[in-house]
Image (spheres, rainbow, N blue to C red):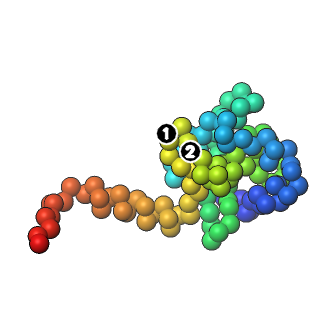
Amino acid sequence: MPDPLDFREEADEGSTSWERADPDNALIERRSWNEWAVLLPDGDEAHVCRLERDHGAYIGECDCPGYEHHDGPCAHLCTLRKAEFGHDEDVEGQRVRVLDPDEERAQNSVERVRADGGPRRRWSR
């Protein structure tokens, strides 16, 4: 993964990417724990973004030309960051959360424990 992304700088500068990012009107589809497809309202196609946290820093990339040809995060990555901050939801109604790999492993292990098919226990009084 590339260097950490500085979303605060994008917001402070009012960059084109930050201004174009619109989680309220974008379509966001989670594909894996750190990957989304993001279609902006003014976009022609969805772009695949990877975004995760590493010790608090945001690390990510996108397949769009804006990310490839410019420094800093593109509008698709900024949309994900704004969606996370604003507690927005993806197309499945799930809150957009950017995880670090340790959180992802912990969530997966909890789900496996819940769905392991083991015996049910009844509580007695």
User: How many C-alpha atoms fall within 10 Å of the one at disc 2: few (<14), some, or many (≥20)?
Assistant: some
Relative height, residue 52 to residue 69 (above, below): below
Report x, y in % for residue 46.
65, 34
The residue depicted at 81 percent of the width and 44 percent of the height is: 19
Report x, y in % for residue 116.
25, 57
The residue depicted at 15 percent of the width and 60 percent of the height is: 119
Q: Mark 2: which secondary structure? A: loop
Whether residue 91 appears in this view of the structure is: yes
Most distant residue in the left direction: 124
The residue depicted at 86 percent of the width and 51 percent of the height is: 14
The residue depicted at 69 percent of the width and 51 percent of the height is: 82
Q: How many labels does the image show?
A: 2
- Amino acid carrying label 2: it is Glu
Q: Mark 1: which secondary structure? A: loop
Report x, y in % for residue 118.
18, 60
Relative height, residue 125 to residue 60 (above, below): below
- Callout 1–callout 2 Cβ contact below 8 Å: yes
Image quadrant where one finds the C terminus: bottom left
Report x, y in % for residue 101.
53, 63
Most distant residue in the right direction: 13
| Quarter location, residue 72 | bottom right
Q: Tag on residue 89? A: 2
Q: Tag on residue 68? A: none
**Left or right of residue 61: residue 14:** right
Whether residue 62 appears in this view of the structure is: no
**Alpha carbon distance from label 1 to label 2:** 7 Å
- Amino acid carrying label 1: it is Glu
User: How many C-alpha atoms fall within 10 Å of the one at disc 1: few (<14), some, or many (≥20)?
Assistant: few
| Quarter location, residue 8 | bottom right
Q: Name the residue under label 1.
A: 92
Viewer-side residue, 51 vs 12 = 12
